[in-house]
Amino acid sequence: MEFIKYILLGILQGFTEPLPISSSGHLVLAEHLFNIGPLSDVNFEIIVNFGSFLAILLIFWKDIVHLVSSFFIYLFNKKKRKTVAKEFKYCLMIIVGSIPVGIAGVLFKDAIDNFSNNTLILGVAFLITAFLLFLVKGSKGKKEDYDITYKDAIIIGLMQMIALMPGISRSGSVLVGCLLCGLSRKSSLKYTFMLYFPVSAASMVLGVKDMIEMGTASTLLLPYACGLIAAFVVTYLSYKWLSSLVQKGHLWKFSIYCLCLGIFVLFYFR
């Protein structure tokens, strides 16, 4: 049962992480519906998130290597600055877009933690996600990767900030922000997951301290590994599905799911 529980939670994390339906909200909901406890286990939370992180890293590996190398070439090789100027600016847009959620996470972490298990807020958050996704129904911008402005990055960063609350999808809110700013569907998807890396990496680094202090029971190492592998594989497949839906302009269909889920949560836990 322990193996099954951790594998199922890994699958749930992996499936919902890329999709605009809030992975954290679904994990909280699973805890309440099925009375399962690993969500209070900091070790497990970090490990399955790391599995999803590795999957997204694999998908965008070439882009990340290109951007990171271009960033340092611009900083330390004046002769080649012009050749990597666009990539350097794109890196700056990632940094700018990550600042709002970083500040909010530090300032309001305790408050967010206090509300994270509130099912009323969870239900409302799912409804907010549904509204945001429906808002961009049919959106089809023309801006490409290197057309993102500082204004766009700030607006999109603020959209990501509100997703600190479980139930409001990070990928969904960022995708909505990108589309509202006029980015193409392809560029919106890429920038959404470029912003994922700083946030996810920072969360894992901050959580490692707690993980070390709490320790990990040796009897759980194998279940943890199974959860990580499940999260990795399913995240990879889930992203591929999301990419196809976004390119076809079907992002709004997730709003129907979030609407139904939000209504269910509000009525079931009232």
Image (tube, rainbow, N blue to C red):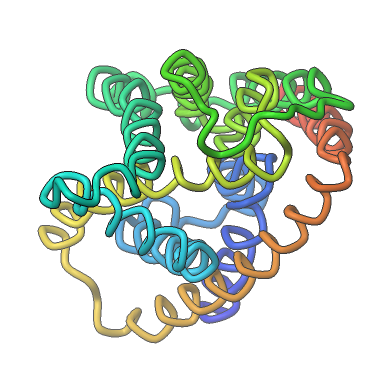
Residue at the image position 44 percent from the left and 40 percent from the top: 195
Please report the residue visible at 51 percent of the width from the left and 19 percent of the height from the top: 152
Res. 123 in view: no
Residue under the image location 46 percent in, 17 percent down: 158
Q: Nearer the viewer, residue 98 or 92?
A: 92
Kindly give the residue lying farthest to the front in the view shown: 79
Q: Is residue 209 left or right of residue 158?
A: left
Tell me: 16 left or right of 69.
right
Compared with 57, 268 (above or below) is above
Picture coordinates of residue 143 (x, y %)?
65, 29
Residue 220 seen from this side: yes
x then y, percent, for residue 141: 75, 27
| Relative height, residue 245 to residue 163 (above, below) | below
The percent coordinates of residue 76 (x first, y second) are 11, 50
Quadrant of the image containing the C terminus: top right
- Asked where in the image residue 215 lies, by quadrant, the reply is bottom left
Q: Is residue 266 left or right of residue 217?
A: right
Tag count in the figure? 0
**The image quarter in which residue 153 lies:** top left
